[in-house]
Amino acid sequence: MQLQQLFSPSVQHTLDVVGIFVFAISGALLAVRKNFDVFGIAVLAEVTALGGGLFRDLVIGAVPPAAFTDLGYFLTPLIAALVVFFLHPHVERIQTGVLVFDAAGLGLFCVSGTTKAYSYGLNLTASATLGLATAVGGGVLRDVLANEVPSLLRWDRDLYAVPAIVGATMVVLCIHYDTLTPFTSGLAVVTAFVLRLLAMRFHWRAPRAWNRRSTVTEE
Amino acid sequence: MQLQQLFSPSVQHTLDVVGIFVFAISGALLAVRKNFDVFGIAVLAEVTALGGGLFRDLVIGAVPPAAFTDLGYFLTPLIAALVVFFLHPHVERIQTGVLVFDAAGLGLFCVSGTTKAYSYGLNLTASATLGLATAVGGGVLRDVLANEVPSLLRWDRDLYAVPAIVGATMVVLCIHYDTLTPFTSGLAVVTAFVLRLLAMRFHWRAPRAWNRRSTVTEE
Amino acid sequence: MQLQQLFSPSVQHTLDVVGIFVFAISGALLAVRKNFDVFGIAVLAEVTALGGGLFRDLVIGAVPPAAFTDLGYFLTPLIAALVVFFLHPHVERIQTGVLVFDAAGLGLFCVSGTTKAYSYGLNLTASATLGLATAVGGGVLRDVLANEVPSLLRWDRDLYAVPAIVGATMVVLCIHYDTLTPFTSGLAVVTAFVLRLLAMRFHWRAPRAWNRRSTVTEE
């Protein structure tokens, strides 16, 4: 289990809470846009922030999941929901700032998710997959509950999965070559973070199926 | 585990089956309204009735979940589906009656869900959260499968989460002060039930985000 | 556990991979139709192929689920996604062929899902239910992620659940009468498969609720 102690526990916990907070903001903002009430905002904040980690913990058998044992993990999204509830026009105005934090959360979660899955005995491919699921799962659940097509799957959104895949892959390569340290982990976080920022800046997109007639965009 | 034996097992089981039945009715009615076939009606009845408890059991590690070990829990929604299949215009006509029973299910499930989660070692906050999830989870799954925005999240529906939150909170307060008895548990059930009835009667609603322009109601 | 060894392990594994592949094709095709990018295609292929088994494994407590421990299970949907990505007009053209394979997957999964659930100690009813869930769960998740009403639930689709229910029921009857052999298992697979083919050929459909005014088809 020493793998989980890449960073000192308090540093790791702080990073997790930061990631949870920014994901919760994105969930709460969507809830406002969908005209949900204050409880809908809180629910969507919780689901977005904790859904990915909850799925990972169920899959690796880490029950009860951290989302239900760590009070800080549970309360952070509620604070984010309150912030959005009272200040949402201001939060909207700093939307770019929110997206930058969301990119940071993506980087943090893909690395911590991969590490935790590996420490529970999964193989390298499965660990990287669960790292990806940890990073993007909350957003998918958020969109499903809001009755929208998950933005993860849409072609007209900037790359989101690829940075997380790269980060998770870097971690499992480091594990494989026995070079996983706080430094290399941090490098993986930063790489995923920067890739996501670049994808947003230059509107990188993934290709759709070959021969797809692009006029058919009834989605 | 003695916590679970608040009521005699047979009383508890009867209450559970009643809650399952009324939730299943609400799922089956939505299926009819969505024009689903008889299997769709049965699936939505099962999911609505057992989804919340299934989620709770997966989170606390109570596998296989009660939904799959207790034949009565499994068959009750099928009976509800048959009732709706053959009698749905009559069931629709007594829609208010159905909503009263649904409120009773809400009260029963938020209390029994909280109690079960605590008996599996979760802390008080997590137990109350899982009590809430037990009570409202099935309805959320029902709406997701029917491809609708969960009515739990919509601002234009009467309060649904709050009564369950109050009931679950009463239970954890009683646990904290060591006063959980069949009487206080029953009081929590009745409080949640009555609050929900009042919310329906007086159309209590929760606020949306401040400064939300209410003209934007394209949802 | 000898129940799981109905077929030789390598035969069983091959059958599983075939079922996974054809389900993944159906997920990837829907992703193309929804205009998703290449990652959306891969995600939908994975979810469709592995979602049903993943749900079953979480319910019976078989963690980490086979989807995350068997590299072949994980890579097969990616290959299916690539096939669809590059060849989808051709795959579309052989849509009937795809549906035949999908029917084969339905037959295989309802039998293997039931058997695995029983080998983990569930009762016969629960085992058959999980067999059904294994066979149809991936398709339901596929449709939910694509923001569509699950075709499993729609009245205007040919029977899909019934063949799986029949196959799963045959398995539990064989278990009950102690006559489960590779031959009888194979018979259950073939029965479900043929029933599904007949349902497609003759457009068998399940009834909707009695007295349902069929003019109301706004779904």
Image (spheres, coloured by chain):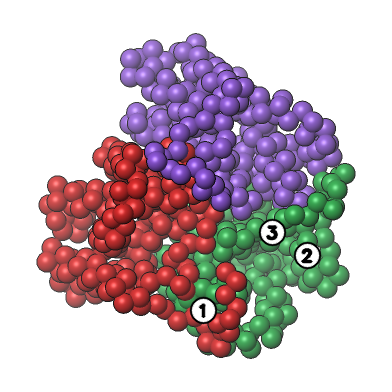
Chain colours: A green, B red, C purple
* Left/right of residue C126 with respect to residue A115 in the rendered view: left
Left or right: where does residue C170 sit relative to residue B194?
Answer: right
Residue at 29% x, 52% y is: B22
Indicate whether B205 appears above or below B13.
below
Q: Which residue is mark 1?
A: A81
Does label 1 lie on the same chain as label 3?
yes
Check if mark 1's residue and mark 2's residue have beta carbons within 8 Å.
Answer: no
Relative image position of residue A153 (x, y in whole percent): 70, 55
Q: Are marks 1 and 2 on the same chain?
A: yes
Mark drawn on residue A152 = 3
Residue B56's place in the image compared with C12, above or below, is: below
Residue at the spot x=24%, y=67% of the render? Answer: B193
Dot 1 or dot 2: first in sequence order is 1
* Mark 2: secondary structure: loop
Label 3: few (<14), some (14–19) or many (≥20) C-alpha neighbours in 10 Å: many
For marks 2 and 3, the one nearer the N-term is 3
Cα–Cα gap, marks 1 and 2: 25 Å
Chain on which label 2 sits: A
Of residues C9 and C43, the one drawn nearer to the viewer in this rendering? C43
Circle 2: residue type: Asp
Q: Which residue type carries mark 3? A: Leu
Spatial CA distance of label 2 from label 3 is 9 Å
Q: Nearer the viewer, residue C8 or C136?
A: C136
Q: Which mark is residue A158?
A: 2
Q: What type is the residue that disc 1 sits on? A: Ala
Seen at 69% across and 59% down, the residue is A152
